[in-house]
Amino acid sequence: MNAKTIGIAGVTVPGAVDCLSKIHRLCADRFPHHHHPRFALDQPDFGVVHQAQDDDRWDLVADSIVGSLKRLAGAGAELAVIPANTVHLVVDDIRARSPIPLISILDVVADACAARGLKRVAILGTRWTMARRLYQAPLAARGIEEVIPDAAQQAAIQRAIFEELVPTGRASAATLAVLLEVVEAMKAQGCDGVALACTELPLVLNDANCGVPAIDTTLVLAEAALAAACA
């Protein structure tokens, strides 16, 4: 088939695997006879990146991603995605140093929020994504207000992500209940949708259990990657 090779610069393993799985499922709907574009995945040790985040060494985070993008280009990738939200805090640096075109999750998620007619969106993600207002500018550019949980709720989401979702890809019933309590609190503040702005959150949250549009950041990134590969 005539399609560009998609490079996936993995950050967490569950996020990378879910992105690849969603691209594959989209291909099953689009192409006959089991065809799909060629993929390349580079998955460094997440522990190194996570420690750099904890140490506020975002230069090292960017270096890790750029290293992945260079290896992906060497493997034949013609475009790339990073199935992780938080590392997009340094996306401008990463993009400037990338040897291949990079699709930003920020742009495609903000576009998805606009496409669903959302006006006030709750951002659920890591503490860096929330506290540093990662989505404020891209949403504001589309006339959408970003709303973040309070400090206690941010801490609860952080625990859910790094104590359960990243290591296991699952959340306990008690943890899921906590996450849904945060969603309800955001709805009470007038949010008409939530962005699942950590690529592990769509593993347990969705439109149905949130009761409002829940933007699956992994899915919209997978859709954008496939569209770009086939353009």
Image: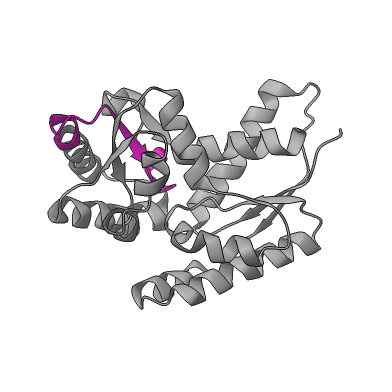
Q: Position of residue 88 (x, y in %)?
A: 47, 57
In the figure, is residue 188 to the left or right of 18?
A: left
Count of marks, rendered view: 0
Of the pair 62 and 154, the residue shown nearer to us: 62
What is the magenta range? Answer: 185-204
Q: Does the magenta run of residues contain 123?
A: no
Up/down of 209 relative to 202, above or below: above
Q: Residue at x 25, y 51 (%)?
A: 157
Q: Nearer the viewer, residue 197 or 144?
A: 144
Coordinates of residue 166 in the picture (x, y in percent): 40, 56
Instruction: Please identify the quarter of the rendering in which residue 93 is found.
Output: bottom right
In the displayed structure, would residue 180 be above or below residue 49?
above
Q: Is residue 60 visible?
A: yes
Determine whether 191 is above or below 62 in the image: above
Reply yes or no: does residue 187 show up in magenta. Answer: yes
Question: Can you see residue 48?
Answer: no
Left or right of 196 on screen, residue 92? right
Q: Is residue 69 left or right of residue 157?
A: right
